[in-house]
Amino acid sequence: MTTSPPFFAQLQVAHPIIQAPMAGVATPALAAAVSNAGAMGSLGIGASSVEQARHMIEDTRTLTDKPININVFCHAPAQRDAAREAAWLAHLAPLFSETGAAMPAALDEIYRSFNDDEESFRMLLALRPAVVSFHFGLPSRDRIAALANAGVRTMATATNLTEALRIEEAGVDAIVAQGIEAGGHRGMFDPDAPDECLSMAVLVRLLVKRTNSPIIAAGGIMDGAGVKAALDLGAAGVQLGTAFILCPESAAGDAYRQNLQNERAGSTALTAALSGRPARGLVNRLIRHGASGGVRPADYPVAYDAAKQLHAAAAKAGNHEFAAHWAGQGAPLARAMPAAELVRLLVREAQAAGGAA
Ligand SMILES: Cc1cc2nc3c(=O)[nH]c(=O)nc-3n(C[C@H](O)[C@H](O)[C@H](O)COP(=O)(O)O)c2cc1C
């Protein structure tokens, strides 16, 4: 019996490094620069319409013919609850009045789940990116099989062993082991389930031992020593998000970049106050306000509608205290440099540390 070649070799990706899909931050220029440098770039289309997503993928393809990963959100549809949403808006009312913005009369479910979105599925089947990855759960087995039949490899995020076993059983090709250190949204399938908050190191070891899938380590990996450490734990590859935010090719705005490069980078928190699902970001006034008063945010992504409206109004006056500046615990180690240079540096550092990145 022959063993199939490792995940990255099959994809013909030279370095086992993935630039994380970061909805709103990863751009065609970022993903293409990473892929052209021999790692794998990703685009997050979870917050995009099908037309926006198609344009992003086509734009990336004008910049690279190397493999890219396209990431979608597979969350359960929002549980609409008028009383809960009104209570959340009432909790945010002082912040709206401070910015002078009109209080929204009602909130919307601003993103569709990929699981309810036939058009995005058809678009991905037609464009056939090298990899499609799933966050917040899984699509149907039929869709996973259809992508596989079209030659598309798949990955899905797990934050614990139970999720990893479901991913493996569903026939997904690789598991992204997302530790509690990670920036952005925790990919947990059910945000109301108990969360062990496993570190990347523990989760990677657990999944290497208990599954037969390639494990991609994510969370707090910022340099080549971190890459090597994750590979030494048995990971087949690594996925880095926060490390790429300061690249000039990312869509991060000036305030986000400044905060990542000053003392605020040392203070991140997991919060559901921004979007309705736990996510790690640089601590700001909205995160602190959300933690006060014991009020439960509206469900994901309904709460995000409120946060985005609040931020848009405040940002007009130069106030970025209500922004979603997602970042992981390794944020103080983020380095500002072009993405291709960062990939080359990560590889050099990992090799200097004795690793085979
Ligand atoms: C700004 C930002 C946006 C993110 N958006 C997504 C996303 O759209 N889809 C996804 O699967 N993961 C997303 N993540 C999580 C990453 O996939 C990954 O788990 C995380 O970046 C790893 O931790 P690190 O930031 O410490 O490297 C995001 C992370 C960041 C920092």
Image (cartoon, helix red, strand yellow):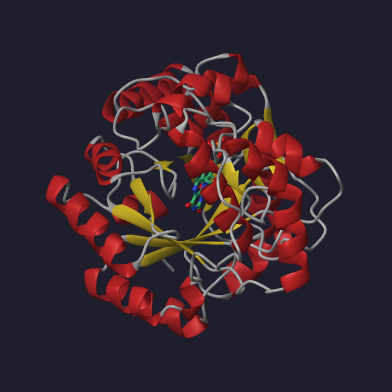
Q: Look at the image and tell me in which quarter the N terminus lies.
A: bottom left
Residue 216 in the image: state x and y as whole percent: 52, 48
- Residue at 61% x, 20% y is 264
Q: Nearer the viewer, residue 82 or 173?
A: 82
Q: Residue furthest bottom?
A: 142
Q: Look at the image and tell me in which quarter the C terminus lies.
A: top left
Residue 317 in the image: state x and y as whole percent: 47, 30
Residue 52 in the image: state x and y as whole percent: 29, 61
Query: Would residue 281 be found to the left or right of residue 86 on screen?
Result: left
Residue 16 in the image: state x and y as whole percent: 40, 41
- Residue at 70% x, 48% y is 93
- Residue at 73% x, 63% y is 86
Q: Nearer the viewer, residue 326 or 104?
A: 104
Q: Nearer the viewer, residue 197 or 47?
A: 47
Is residue 67 visible from the viewing direction of this image? yes
Q: Residue furthest right?
A: 294
Q: Quadrant of residue 77?
A: bottom right
Is residue 6 visible from the viewing direction of this image? no
Q: Quadrant of residue 346?
A: top left
- Residue at 75% x, 38% y is 289
Q: Quadrant of residue 51?
A: bottom left
Query: Would residue 235 be found to the left or right of residue 201 on screen?
Result: left
Query: Would residue 169 be found to the left or right of residue 357 on screen?
Result: right
**Count of marks placed on residues:** 0
Please determine whether, in this image, residue 82 is positioned above or below residue 338: below
